[in-house]
Amino acid sequence: MFRDLPRYPEMMVSQFWAATAPSHWEVHPGLAVLAENRRKNDGLIESQVLSLSYGRVVVKPAEKQRGLVPDSYESYQILGPGDIVVRPTDLQNDQTSIRVGHVKDRGIITSAYIGLRARGSWSDAYAYHYLAVVDSSKRIYGMGSGLRQQLGWPDLKRMPCLVPPPEEQAAIVKYLAHANARIDKVIAAKRRLIALLEEQRQAEVSASIANGDTATGDYWFPRLRAGWGVVSLGRVLHRAVDGPHFSPPYANSGVPFLSARNLKPGRWSLGDLKYIDETLATEFDQRIRPEIGDVLYSKGGTTGVAKAVDIAERFQVWVHIAVLKLRRDLVSPDFLELVLNSSACYEQSQLETRGATNQDLGLGRMKRISIPIAPLEAQTAFVREIRCRVDHVTDAVGRTRREITLLQEFRTRLVADVVTGQVDVRAIAATLPNAPEVAVEAFEEDVPLLDEELDDAVEGEDE
């Protein structure tokens, strides 16, 4: 399906794409194939709220409509199935978000977004793929105007648009549906493998802690190694501080700002990393400045995930990350990271988490979590032992993550080549069934749904 895709025999030069395109395709301005949505929610005709989240337009349940909620939804625009939504704001400072989504449900979305509908010679599915490629290829970031480089309908209506014949658009859409379904299934399988490997790593740590010969009398750690004991987390801390309780304005560069999505068991995840400017970072430094030897602990969304700070670069953290300042005479950062990511500590964090919609593990409740403790020499030996035992798991997880990254890069390139006519998929599309095999949806790795909702609430992604 992916090998030896043929080229079109006759090509023309496409200035917009800095490449060639099939000579029988037409080129029209956006105004000829797109119409701007002008349907306002006057009189509150519609109440179902839509959200553009990681490239998907999803229905937002009423109980999760929080953050920057408007006084009235009359200012929102009405969208229907087949419409396309584009997030046009702040192109200069945010060049990582997915800005284009295809609407599947009727509902309303903020008028800060651009709503579009295919017209003329474009089908809605091909129009979506074309605009998504404009986004993924970063051409969208050269189209805006103004101080914060905001995109508008005047920019889109002048944009050069490739227009294949209708039957060719259908072939392209059909091929991409099958290709994406196949890639999604592979990615989903690799994500399941990573989850199993992470469970194996956690089980190794938990078993090593629990397989002792000393009865402690503690519910969470009934048996420990000789010389070990159980204390509350607060006993080994100088202090614990969380990040700012509001969403700061982001910059294109500056000081990295970590949210809960960037903190994963035993590692950093620096995808979709945000930045804040130096002045704001200096203000935050007065409250908290993470330093080498601290431990970061997620207390919202991915509750129960810890990572020892081992990088010298300056950064700041969001409200759902606590920075633990350790009593280094009692506990080492690497040891505390391991025990906080054990199943017993994770279960305690889940029991202590509060909040109906915006869940959070408060600093006070977090300090009550029971942890095993050992002499410093024994902690060092334990960390060395665990790392030796799980090295093969860590290597396997790393390889699988790299494979997922390569699959995602392959998908981006494949979609761009097909949509812009670099390869001809008409023949292979004719051999495919009308509907692709149903695939398990492969969500963005490292972005659990609850974490996504928490970030959306605080950062006001929809507003």
Image (spheres, grey):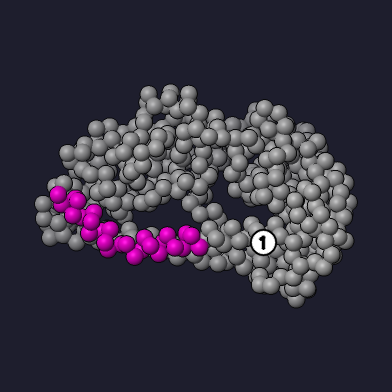
Give the amino acid type for the residue marked by disc 1 in the picture.
Leu
Which residue appears at 70% of the width and 39% of the height? 142
Q: Is residue 121 visible?
A: yes
Q: What stretch is highlighted in magenta?
A: 377-403
Q: Based on the displayed image, in which of its 4 quarters is residue 369 positioned?
A: top left
**Identity of the residue drawn at 17% across and 39% down:** 329
Foreground of the two, 215 or 92 = 92
As for residue 129 lying within the magenta part, the answer is no
Q: Can residue 81 be seen in this view?
A: no
Q: Nearer the viewer, residue 368 or 24?
A: 24
* Relative to 234, 352 lies left or right: right
387 in relation to 31, above or below:
below
Question: Regarding mark 1 in the picture, which secondary structure is present there?
Answer: helix
Quickly name the residue at label 1: 414
Q: In this view, does 325 lie above or below 378?
A: above
Q: Quadrant of the C terminus?
A: top right
Q: Where is residue 415 in the image (x, y as percent from the top left)?
A: 69, 59
Query: At which x and y percent is residue 8?
Result: 80, 66
